[in-house]
Image (cartoon, rainbow, N blue to C red):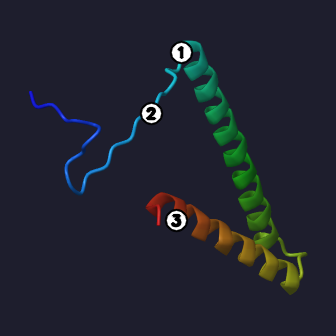
Amino acid sequence: MSHIDLNNPPPNHTFSVSVDRQETDAERNVRLFKDLALFIVALGFVVLIVWLCYATLVATTTSAEEKKWAMSVLSAATGGIIGYLLRK
């Protein structure tokens, strides 16, 4: 095993030290529950908005301006979902 002298590091090398607190099982469970709850609420809102836009598009009583608005929202939602899935 080789030893590195931290007072004199090799050329073109740097070092850093960090102290991290270890997450307990209870903290992990709370964090995961919060993440899951937030994901479900966000997914519910997205589904609601998509459903409202679709209902606006298929309704016979909506005006052309409302249908343009609904198409714009659906296009933005579709682009956001595709961007999220591709992560770019």
Is there CB contact under 8 Å for labels 3 and 2?
Answer: no
Rendered residue at 53%/15% (across/down): 24
Badge 1 local density, few (<14 within 10 Å), some, or many (20+)? few
Tell me the quarter of the picture where residue 29 sits: top right
Q: CA distance from mark 1 to mark 2?
A: 19 Å
Residue that mark 1 sits on: 24
Mark 3 or mark 2: whose residue is earlier in sequence: 2
Mark 1 or mark 2: whose residue is earlier in sequence: 2
Name the spot of residue 81 as percent of width and height, x first.
57, 61
Badge 2 local density, few (<14 within 10 Å), some, or many (20+)? few
Tell me the quarter of the picture where residue 49 sits: bottom right
As helix, strand or loop, the secondary structure at mark 1 comes to: loop
Q: Nearer the viewer, residue 18 or 61?
A: 18
Badge 3 local density, few (<14 within 10 Å), some, or many (20+)? few
Rendered residue at 48%/58% (across/down): 85
Residue that mark 2 sits on: 18
Name the spot of residue 78 as percent of width and height, x first.
60, 68
Residue 82, numbered circle: 3
Name the spot of residue 16 as percent of width and height, x first.
38, 41
